[in-house]
Image: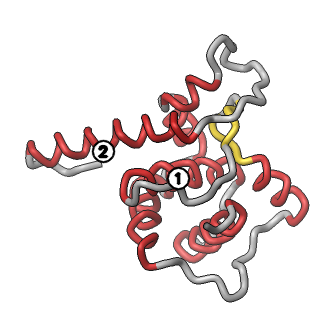
Amino acid sequence: MESAITYARYVASRYKDTFGDSIDEMKLHKLLYFAQRESLIQLGKPLFSESFYAWKYGPVLVAVRNYSRIFRELTPQAGFSLKEELEPVFDKVFSQYAGKDSWSLSRLSHGEFSWQNARKGLGPVDHCDRAMTIEDIKVDADRIKLRRYFISQLGVGAN
């Protein structure tokens, strides 16, 4: 299992290749969250073991935040190539979320059970150092998987 930083570097590189611009940190964290959830949907397992924290603007990986603060720009990792089984995971995340602005992704992440559960008892702007559990992210993944199934049964475009 690769580290969250490895995938952060991959997402930053792919984003730059796709959109011709550097990814902002908020969007990076949200795309990583959606990639973690998508991996649970498609593969039944997490991409990485690091935990997201339920910060006020949505899920944040503290290790990635600290790394990006030190190095400013996340560069591709030499010799890293995405495993073939992960390509559909990142393709789905990029097609569905990468084109959205950071604040929209933040609002989407606020609708996730995993983020809400970790912030129980806190106000919308309260500081939070609570980890989001992988079990709660699995709940979100199962909800999306079920929604996609029902949408496919209706014969309309799946999300």
Spot occupied by residue 25 in the image (x, y as percentages of width and height) = 71, 52
- The alpha-carbon separation of the residues under discs 2 and 1 comes to 14 Å
- Residue 128, labelled with which disc? none
Q: Quick one: which residue is furthest to the right in this view?
A: 70
Residue shown at 84% from the left, 63% from the top: 72
On the rendered structure, is 5 left or right of 99? right
| Residue 32, percent from left and from top | 59, 54
| Residue name at image x 30 percent, y 45 percent | 145
Q: Which residue is mark 2?
A: 145
Above/below status of 8 relative to 59: below
Circle 1 crowding by C-alpha within 10 Å: few under 14, some 14–19, many from 20: many
- The relative height of residue 139 versus residue 21 in the rendered view (above or below) is above
Q: Do callouts 2 and 1 mark residues in contact (Cβ within 8 Å)?
A: no
Residue 45 % position (x, y): 47, 56
Mark 2: few, some, or many residues within 10 Å (few <14, many ≥20)? some
Image spot of residue 131 (x, y percent): 69, 34
Say which of 44 and 52 sits in front.
Answer: 44
Which residue type does callout 2 highlight?
Lys
Q: The disc labelled 1 sits on which kind of residue?
A: Gln
Please give left or right for residue 13 compared with residue 112 in the image: right
What is the basis of the colouring in this image?
secondary structure
Q: Work out which quarter of the rendered image holds the N terminus and state it.
A: bottom right
The residue pinned by badge 1 equals 36
Mark 2 vs 1, N-terminal side: 1
Element at label 2: helix
